[in-house]
Image: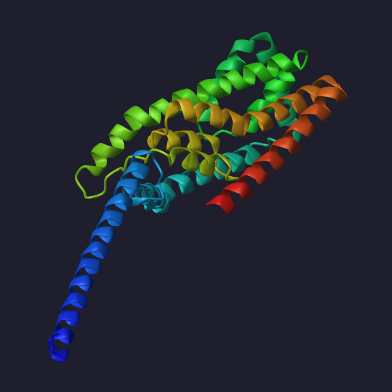
Amino acid sequence: MLPPLVEAAAGHAGIMRMGAVCGAASMEESLRAEFVQEKMNKRRERNGDCRWGGKRAGCAASMELMKKLLKDRRFHRLAGGALVLGAGAVLLAWRMGVDLATLKEWWKVTEDFLKAHPWWLFAALVVLPGLPMPTSALMVLAGTVWSERPVMACGLALLALALNMSWTYWLAARPGRGLVEKLLAAGTLRVPELPRGNDLRLLLVLRLTPGVPLFFQNYLLGFFRVPFPLYLPVSLACTGLISCGIVLSGAGVAGGNLAPMFTGLGLIVLGVVVVQVFRRKFRVSG
């Protein structure tokens, strides 16, 4: 029989060995869990989830660059210059004696010309929304010119809108972005690539934010190279309903037909409601 002191020492040694084994097992389990977590994070990054790792940094970089562009003094000067030119044009027209009756006469002359040459209207719908022009006025004009065939007017307006969104996108995605990258090459600022999985978020933020001009949305989305197969259908879905409502309303007023007018007003109201619902859902999920 071992002395009590030897027994105590042996028991203590056994406890130490058991603790070491348990500690090693716990450390191994912790390392295995960290390894699994790291693999899951990498898989999520590859799948385009911008909430994880490098994707979050990419999302932040894209949003930060957008903020810098919007806060840039040159952008403010450009916007201010456009406002000054617009105000100058209004003042010049007022000094020249242009009043509401004159504007109505000009509108009538333009409408008669476009009725005789409808393809000029289609070309204007394709080109002019890419400039600082009110797209809604062009849609009203489309409704008044093609008032006898309002469904055809909606179809042509949507086709022209799709073509406009296409050429403005590619203009910004190719030569526009290349020019900006060359200008930024001398400094430290770089244009980040938009992370995969964040395209829809940026697209909806711009399309569902009221007050942002259509041409600015198109150029900015093209600049960030949102995938075109996603860009075009989502853009048309966000703007097409209200655009068709404006066309139908213009056709109803011009033709004295209440059916297309009330249908157009209903589409405008429905479009506004849908946009507000999506904005609220997007804000909650974001």
Image: 111 above or below 226: above
Q: Quadrant of residue 278?
A: top right
Residue 213 in view (yes/no): yes
Scheme of image coloration: rainbow
For the residue pair 145 and 243, the one nearer the viewer reads as 243
Residue at 68 percent across and 21 percent down: it is: 142
Q: Quadrant of residue 43?
A: top left
Q: Position of residue 57 (x, y in %)?
A: 33, 51
Q: Tell whether 137 sits left or right of 20.
A: right
Residue lying at the far front of the rendered structure: 1
Q: Quadrant of residue 92?
A: top right
Residue at 26 percent across and 49 percent down: it is: 189
Q: Tell whether 185 sits left or right of 112.
A: left
How many numbered discs, if any? Answer: 0
For the residue pair 203 and 166, the one nearer the viewer reads as 203
Q: Position of residue 169 (x, y in %)?
A: 44, 28
Check the picture and name the quadrant holding the N terminus.
bottom left
Residue at 67 percent across and 30 percent down: it is: 241
Residue 112 in view (yes/no): no
Q: Tell whether 51 sits left or right of 116.
A: left
Q: Position of residue 159 (x, y in %)?
A: 58, 18
Residue at 41 percent across and 54 percent down: it is: 71
